[in-house]
Amino acid sequence: MKVAHLVPTLHPGGPETGLVDLAAAASQAGLELMVVALSTTSDTTQVSALRRLGVPVAELGLAPYDPRSAGRVARALRERGAELIHTHLPHADVVGAAAALRMRVPVVSTLHHIENEPADRLDRLRRTARILARQRFMSRTVAISRTQREWYRGLGGPAGDIVVLPDGVVDPAPVDVAEGERVRAILEVGDGGTLALSTAPMRRDAGHELLLDALELIPVATPLTVALAGDGPLRPWLESRVAASDTLRDRVRFVHRGQDAATLLASADLVLHTSASGALPTALLRAMAAGVPAVATRVGGVPEVVSGDTGVLVSLQPGPISDAIVALAADPARRERLGAAARRRYLAEFEAVGWAQRLRTLYDGVLA
């Protein structure tokens, strides 16, 4: 089955990054993927990864709301014989629905966020328009968590055609023990020390300020190193805050942008996720796949990933976050137990091949 995924851009850091995981598993579900991005990105990491997996990628270089978008997308997908269009994020939803009408093929849309309340009347009107467009044009709307589905229904979204289908991630390859030890040495993790990792993108909504507040409360004697591995516009500010604090400067390390994420996860003892929102954070799925327990804030769909068996859920306050980190850092047996349970749950619910197969079943129903 030839399925075209339409995204606004393939810049790393957005929800579109999951397409690489899907591409790696697609053939085992009988899916042939193609990806079309409305605009062009200067960072070709995702584009290159998709092409290495044999996925055709087209970047159309279109500006937002370019009136030629639907025609250009329809033409690109006709040439590749797409049987169904799967859109991601609002701009791609609008363009994809229009292109699907021209091509007379069905279209599926995935919700990726749980949004905050609209700021003003215009925002509310835009949200209402998107909901009405989904009701009219989308064959199915996919929520990636139960919490997200209930949020969307609360906005007046369609009750009948919304399907809960969580994302998946590829099972990581084993990492050489010596390589993991080398990474820990580079990050200056002492003998018997604990390495905690945050891979969240460095932007305002990812909770880094809250995490640093919590880290300043941890006793100096606690043998803990925290690696911040994300990137983004907030990085210079975070670096300056850490440099200005003796407590943080001795504990926090900024990971080089080129460091392999799988190796980092395999080297870590626990993962930190302190965002104020999240429908189903991929970073937590990757931690589960690596068998690493998480300390995560109890927001959005996070409790559908992290439970008392696989990690620790905390409130959006520095004190509880700090206490949970200290407790896990001092208890390697508990970390091992939680990590093993997280790995088992990942294999049962969030492995990429199973995700691809569930999507194939969804597509079959839509085409039927």
Image (spheres, grey):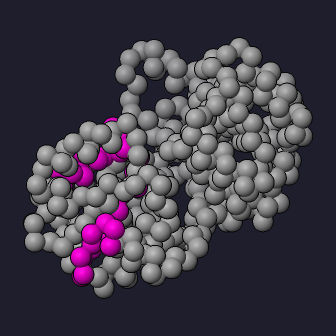
The reply to whether the magenta stretch includes residue 200 is yes
- Report the side of 292 relative to 346 (left or right): left
Q: Which residue is drawn at 31% across and 66% down?
A: 187
Specify whether residue 27 is in view. Answer: yes
Q: Residue 43's spot in the image, x, y percent?
A: 57, 40
Spot occupied by residue 23 in the image (x, y as percentages of width and height): 71, 55
- Name the residue: 58% across, 56% down: 166
Q: Residue 7 is drawn in which quadrant?
A: top right
Q: Is 117 or 44 nearer to us in this picture?
A: 44
Name the side, left or right, on which 222 lies relative to 267.
left
Horizontally, residue 214 falls left or right of residue 17, namely left
Is 126 rendered above or below residue 343? above
222 falls in the magenta region: no
Residue 159 is at least partly visible in this image = no
Q: Where is residue 225 in the image (x, y as percent from the top left)?
A: 25, 66
| Residue 367 percent across, percent down from the top left | 84, 45
Q: In which quarter of the image is residue 90?
A: top right
At x 77%, y 50%, the residue is 55
* Count of numbered circles on the image: 0
Is 226 positioned to the left or the right of 183 in the image?
Answer: left
Please name the residue shown 80% across and 37% down the image.
106
Residue numbers of the magenta segment: 185-214
Return the residue found at the far bottom.
Answer: 333
